[in-house]
Amino acid sequence: MKVAILAGGLGTRISEESHLKPKPMITIGEQPILWHIMKYYSSFGFHDFVICCGYKGHLIKEYFADYYLYRSDVTFDFSAENHMTIHQNIAEPWRVTLVDTGLNTQTGGRIKRIQRYIGDAPFLLTYGDGLSDVDLNALLKQHRSSGKTVTLTGIQPGGRFGVLALDDTGKTVKGFREKAREDGGWINGGFMVMEPEAFRYLSAEESCILERTPLETLAKEGKLGIYKHSGFWQCMDTQRDRGMLEGLWGNARAPWKVWDG
């Protein structure tokens, strides 16, 4: 199953870093947050990634073009016709497709523009600035048994996000409410599963925002499910957020670090 990652936004709320690089390339420890997200998915056996690039997307492409070299010990022998020897290389089991989805394209438009790389199959989707310890296997199991077109991961971070309105079962999203005071409401934390039918609700236009008409329409039709996650979740919107994630990683207390090495 392929994993699509939205990595094309401007990241204006963390502009101290994002004026130099795309937000998913801002580092936690010595690696971009994008790497942390991919390592997490890969630990569950999902190794095929389609990354929606936009703002400064060439830096993401350069990172992966040189990834093998960066992660290996290397000997350059300039006396032997510039011969290069790779030692102790660390290879990831990844297949990474990088797609230029436009500089100013909104989330829905970006996803629609990668449709040909996804194909006619269910896929996973998340944002390139959020980390969690969500159980991806349980998420996928619930999605498959629910019959929903899209299942998103619901989290409860507090009152600065828009809130999801749920039906009586607590497993179907009926609609959305504007940002509210902290009231225990569930919000969309990313880590979604989508059936190929979801592409019918999207447009390749720059103005198509996934979280607006597409998801709202799916909610009205009863086709949008929620997997409730009460564990760790944190987006990296500000330098304060980054500092908190850095602290967890540096102190070996990162809940998303479930892989060895």
Image (cartoon, grey):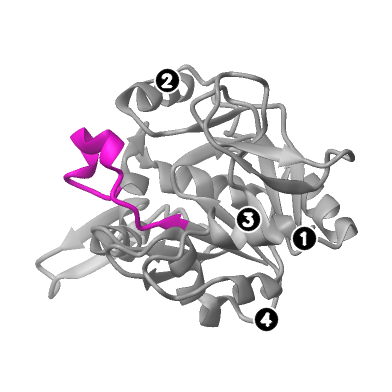
Looking at the image, do the residues carrying marks 3 and 2 touch, with CB atoms under 8 Å apart? no
Front of the two marks 3 and 1: 3
Front of the two marks 1 and 2: 1
Front of the two marks 4 and 2: 4
Which of pointers 1 and 2 lies earlier in the amino acid sequence?
1
* Residue type indicated by callout 3: Glu
Report how far apart the C-alphas of labels 1 and 2 lie in the structure: 35 Å
* Residue matched to label 2: 244
Report how far apart the C-alphas of labels 4 and 1 lie in the structure: 18 Å
* Residue matched to label 4: 120
Categorize mark 1 by other alpha carbons within 10 Å: few (<14), some (14-19), many (20+). Answer: many
In the rendered image, the residue lying farthest to the left is 79
Give the residues drawn in magenta, as a range: 6-22
* Residue type indicated by callout 4: Asp
Which of pointers 4 and 1 lies earlier in the amino acid sequence?
4
Query: Is 129 located above or below residue 206 in the figure?
Result: above
